[in-house]
Amino acid sequence: MTFLELAAKRSSIRGYKPDPVPEDWLAKVLEAGRLAPSAANKQPWHFIVVREEPARLKLQQAYPRDWFGKAPAILVVCVEPGKAWVRQDGKNYVSVDGAIAMDHMTLCAADLGLGTCWIGAFDPKKARDILGLPEGIEPLAMTPLGFPDAPPRPKSRKETAEILHYERW
């Protein structure tokens, strides 16, 4: 499969079979996140794997959707702003770095035939409390991880002409 085929295959999955993710597949997904690039190679991320049902259901309090806690695993990308690269104008790249790591993991999961759904619309305070995050660590994004229980919905994307500019706006 080419990279563009993989990018087209990745989809937001909102239904999962209860079958556990094989340990070696989970390790590959996590390795993809670890290998992601980051600004100045700071790697200001941490990954939390939530697999036990009581813990998944508790984490669902931060994102109250029935399907979310039913996945056999939930991955949480946390970031450490104090350890990230900061551009000269003060822009901290921690969110960019964490997003790249999450993207690597979702693409690896798609390559393995696993489903994910990037979750950013969660309650960060609840997630932080539930996950027991120490001071200085922030939850950035979460994704359920597992085998899809149905084919993905068709993707809807803007046409290239709507988003592409050359030389200037």
Image: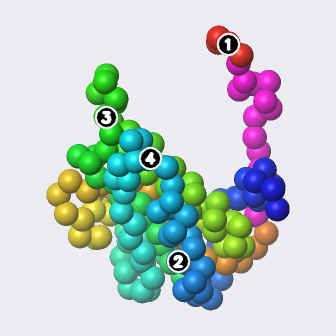
Q: Amino acid at mark 1?
A: Glu
4 and 2 marks in contact (CB < 8 Å): no
List the residue tagged with mark 4.
38
Report the magenta residues as a range: 152-165
Count of numbered circles on the image: 4
Q: Which mark is residue 27?
A: 2
Q: What whole-number distance in Å separates the C-alpha atoms at marks 4 and 2?
A: 20 Å
| Residue carrying label 1 | 167
Question: Looking at the image, is mark 4 or mark 2 earlier in the sequence?
Answer: 2
Mark 1 and mark 3: span between their CA atoms?
27 Å
As helix, strand or loop, the secondary structure at mark 1 comes to: loop
Quarter of the image where the N terminus is located: bottom right
Kindly state the secondary structure of the residue where label 2 is placed.
helix
Q: Can you tell which quarter of the image residue 77 is in?
A: bottom left
Q: CA distance from mark 2 to mark 1?
A: 42 Å
- Mark 2 vs mark 3: which is more N-terminal? 2
Magenta portion: prevailing SS class: loop
Nearer the N terminus, badge 1 or badge 4?
4
As for residue 58 lying within the magenta part, the answer is no
Q: Residue at x 43, y 51 (%)?
A: 98
How far apart in space, not on screen, are marks 1 and 4 (Cα)? Answer: 26 Å
The part of the image, by quadrant, that contains residue 138 is bottom left
Name which residue lies at 70% across and 59% down: 10
Specify whether residue 81 is in view.
yes
> Is residue 169 rendered to the left or right of residue 139?
right
Where residue 27 appears, as percent x and y from the top left, is 53, 77
First in sequence, mark 3 or 4: give its number. Answer: 4
Please state the horizontal and vertical placement of residue 86, each as a whole percent of the image: 31, 34
The numbered dot on residue 86 is 3
Point out the tag, 2 or 1, that comes first from the N-terminus.
2
**Identity of the amino acid at label 2?**
Ala
